[in-house]
Image (cartoon, rainbow, N blue to C red):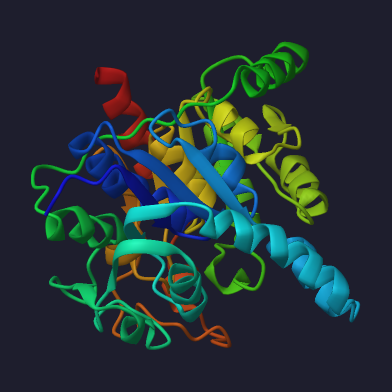
Amino acid sequence: MSVPSSILVIRLSSLGDVLMTLPAVRAIRNAYPPARLTWLVEGSVGELLSHQGFIDEVIQFPRGTIQRSLKAGNLPEVIRELGPFVGKLRETEYDLVLDFHGIIKSAIFSNLVKGKRKVGFGRTYAKEKSHLFYAEHVGGGTKRLHKVERNMLFPRYLGINGPVPEVRLDVGSEAEAYIDRFFAGTRIDPPVFAVNPFSSKGSRFKRWNIERYGELIRRITGQGIARALVLWGPGEEEEARYLKEIGGDGTFLACPTSVPQLLALLKRVDMYIGGDTGMMHLAVFGGTPVLAIFGPTDHKINGPFGPAHRLIRKDLPCSPCKNKKCKDRYCLTEITVDEVFESVLDLHNHEGRN
């Protein structure tokens, strides 16, 4: 194929999934350095993408505004929002359009775009029959392939071989200064371990017990290993304050953050401890050692990518699963504070030797 001069990447959300697309996009950009690379995204992760030097342009789908207008029954406002967005989407003819998302919405967007070649996932990874929208399909691999490796099937399809590129994310100077002020004002003595007991809205079934997080923090701080910094997002501050309280001395509450500010914070801590969330992947791509506590979700697909991290889970016959209504949750309740603490020590000691 001829070398493309313009490329559109479509991966709309969520934070973790966008992050796990970055190595594949980095590989494609490395192969075609003169090409102009544009990313179509939605939500707050778009601000982070705009700070990455290998991405030339970010097009933001105004999902939030459109959802609010639809909820209010304001159809004219929806049309006013969609008009400029579609116009922006169609103003460039791309040599190559790559749909990493693989749902109906992303396939519709790809068909609105003027593109010479449009490539999407094949039947194995496509959802909602979105593969029917594409003449060119990316396939191969198994159903339980890690999402980073799954996304790497795109550059492989384009003839771009080699190892998974290392990606270290950049943040803007304003985000760095904001976190500098936070640490200067809070005066947390290093080392600092960030603890995130939460999960995304609608996925509380993935959370390890918050009281166990509290006991874990007391062991970490009580033995003088590190200070603990409790992370939180929208709607989580009250529970975060509770964890700070039960964590006791040496436990601090993080400041509110945007995605770039959160990355700047994660780059400053010595370890990240938490469950299967986008924040966990942000820590991975920020270069922070991660200790991940996994319950029902599939660690082979969504675990922290790379050998520098630790993952704790129970190998049960029913795991992984997607049963949000499970009352037993043995996959999480059988994970003890003792074994998590031992993994914390192991990871900390390993990092200390490096």
Camera-side residue: 129 or 311?
Answer: 129
State whether residue 42 is above or below residue 166: below
The percent position of residue 216, horizontal first and vertical second, equals: 55, 45
Which quadrant of the figure contains the C terminus?
Answer: top left
Q: Residue at x 65, y 24 (%)?
A: 175
Q: How many marks?
A: 0
- Left or right of 316: which side holds 331? right
Identify the residue at image location x=55%, y=62%.
208
Front position in the image: 348 or 271: 271
Front residue of this view, candidates 54 and 339: 54
Q: Can see residue 155?
A: yes
Residue 42: in sight, yes or no? no
Please identify the quadrant where the N terminus is shown.
bottom left
Q: Is residue 293 left or right of residue 231?
A: left
Residue at 56% of width from left, 36% of height from top?
A: 194
Q: Residue at x 86, y 69 (%)?
A: 77
Judge whether 91 appears above or below 289 on screen: below
Q: Position of residue 88 (x, y in %)?
A: 59, 54
Q: x%, y% of residue 300?
A: 27, 65
Figure quadrant of residue 54: top left
In the rendered image, the vertical position of residue 334 relative to residue 324, given as above or below: above
Going by the image, does 187 lie left or right of 121?
right
Q: Position of residue 80 (x, y in %)?
A: 80, 65
Quadrant housing residue 290: top left
Closest to the observer, 153 or 87:
87
